[in-house]
Image (spheres, rainbow, N blue to C red):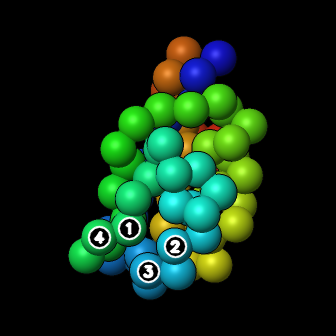
């Protein structure tokens, strides 16, 4: 299984929790952006830490949204 993170740019409030947790996956510029990949656990941890719930996580195998 591999998780794919996506940012809801309208929901992003620039808290930068995602970048703090997974700097190899996220960067905060005008909004958070996905810049790479990482372990599923790290992607999920960053998504769960986002106060704005701006990170959607999808399972690349099934296409199913797993978070939020």
Q: Is residue 52 left or right of residue 44?
A: left
CA separation, marks 1 and 3?
Answer: 7 Å
In this orientation, which residue lies closer to the viewer: 66 or 46? Answer: 46
Q: Residue at x 34, y 57 (%)?
A: 33
CA separation, marks 2 and 4?
Answer: 9 Å
Say if mark 1 contacts mark 2, CB within 8 Å: yes
SS for tag 1?
Answer: strand
Q: Farthest residue in the left direction?
A: 30
CA separation, marks 3 and 2?
Answer: 5 Å
Query: Which residue in the structure is indicated by mark 1?
Result: 28
Decide if residue 68 is in sight here: no
SS for tag 3?
Answer: loop
Q: Residue at x 67, y 32 (%)?
A: 40
At which x and y percent is residue 47?
62, 57
Query: Which residue in the structure is indicated by mark 3?
Result: 14
| Mark 2 vs 4, N-terminal side | 2
Quadrant occupied by the N terminus: top right
Say if mark 3 contacts mark 2, CB within 8 Å: yes
Neighbourhood count class around disc 2 (C-alpha, 10 Å): few under 14, some 14–19, many 20 upward:
many
Question: Picture quarter containing residue 17?
Answer: bottom right
Say if mark 4 contacts mark 1, CB within 8 Å: yes
Residue 16's disc is 2
């Amino acid at each position: 299984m591999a998780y794919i993170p996506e940012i809801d740019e309208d929901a992003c409030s620039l808290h930068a929790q995602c970048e703090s947790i997974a700097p190899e996956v996220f960067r905060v510029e005008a909004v958070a952006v996905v810049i790479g990949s990482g372990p599923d656990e790290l992607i999920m941890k960053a998504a769960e830490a986002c106060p704005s719930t701006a990170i959607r996580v999808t399972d690349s195998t099934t296409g199913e949204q797993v978070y939020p």
